[in-house]
Amino acid sequence: MFSQVLHHTRGDFIRRLIAIAMPITLQSIMFSSRSLVDVLMLGQLGEAEIAAVGVAARATFVTTIMLVGVTTGGAMLTAQYWGAGDRQGVRESTALTWLVCTIFAALTASLFILFPTQIMGLATNDTDVNRLGSEYLVITSVTMFAVAGVASMSVGLRAMHRPGISTFFSGIGIVSNIFLNWVLIFGKLGIPAMGIKGAAIATVMSGAIEVVTLFGYLYAKKHLLAFGLEDIRSVIELPRVIKFLKLSLPTTFNFLAWAGGLFAYHAIMGQSGVQGLAALSVMTPVESISLALLIGMSNAAAVLVGNQIGAKNYEAVYYQAIGVTLLSLIVGILVAAILYVVQGSVLDAFSALTPETRALAEKFMIVLSLSIILRSVPMMTIVGILRAGGDVKFCLYQDLVAQWLIGIPLAAFAAIGLGWEPQWIYLLFLTEELIKWFGSLHRTRTRKWIRNLIEN
């Protein structure tokens, strides 16, 4: 077994994995940095602002994850089309991904505009936090269209082994976000200080800059993915849309349920007061950045697994799946060790935290380091292997059981029924990862996930 894993993963495979993973990792870091920049800059104003943007950012994260879930159907098909050498299939799959994702973006933006206070009320009873967060949600709602556009193109570029293009334009987006935050939050260059409202406007403007520059570049270069009206018309066929939705909807619901579960964890932590919420809001962007390399690796593995299945190299893809899972665990241990060592420097950046909240955040950091190791294996097996092979229903059912039937009820009982301290509640959030660890590994070994999705 080990010799087969080495045979199929050495040399060119690892080089391609790294070449695809690094731009995705950088893009993931930049995506997470947007909420981190908001938290850091607003953190200089007070804990209510930190808690408000933390809850609101978690709500927008839920919908962003849902949109990414919609793109996964396109990601699976596009990777397999590219592996099979079908360029027109790649182009049309990207067009269909953009179309469906934009429709979902319109629905989620409408929810934020119509029900902001209700959404914030799910996670906090604090009036100031709700008011500030609602204002942030309403303004940032339109960024969902930018997320839909960028995410749709990103999956196509990854399938073609060109993720660096979307990463470059994400860089333009994050630099714009930092500059506009500085101007609008604190009132620079003659513009009045707007606080949390300024952070929201900066998010919208930077998202618009990113999507306009990315699409502008692709169409100026007449790139394969620069689809037109003719491509959109050709993909609006009931069989194609149904096939796409059969792959996308289970994963979309999976992502939505998972991200909704994260919001539920936020609500559970909210029972311990603003202090627990503020500490968790600090952890959220730190966690996202810490997991960026694992996210990059798992998405890169998904591309290569999809390519191999499209090319019908079924034996090789099985041993490559085992190899990338072992690699993910090693990387997870290294990242967790680095985070544990630098935790003091990371927390020093959040200057507005009270001594009590700072002490709580230090305890959260230890739990977060452990969680990175626990998440390394399920992330790779679910994102990089099982979904890439089209095994979307297994992933959905496993997540629902692990998170909603076990993890969330346990944490809620500990917080509400037993009155546990925040750090122990936070530790219970990891229960679901333990369950998914064993379920995902077993499923990978069965080979039932190896499915060719583009054969008629």
Image (cartoon, rainbow, N blue to C red):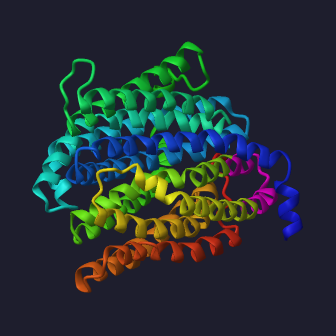
Seen in the picture, residue 249 relative to 223 is either above or below; the reply is below
The residue nearer to you, when weighing 276 against 436, is 276
- Farthest residue to the left: give it: 127
Q: Can residue 161 be seen in this view?
A: yes
Residue at x-position 25% and y-position 33%: 185
- Magenta residues: mostly which secondary structure? helix
Check the image and name the residue furthest to the front: 355
How many marks the image carries: the answer is 0
Q: Is residue 66 left or right of residue 2?
A: left
Q: Residue at x 40, y 58 (%)?
A: 283
Position above or below: 297 against 230: below
Residue 252 visible, this orientation? no
**Is residue 93 inside the magenta stretch?**
no
In front: 345, or 223? 345
Picture quarter with the N terminus? bottom right
Question: Residue at position x 64%, y 65% from top?
Answer: 333
Q: In which quarter of the image is residue 210?
A: top left
* Residue 309 within the segment the image draws in magenta: yes
**Percent from the top left, x then y, of residue 63?**
34, 48
Q: Give the range drawn in magenta.
A: 304-321
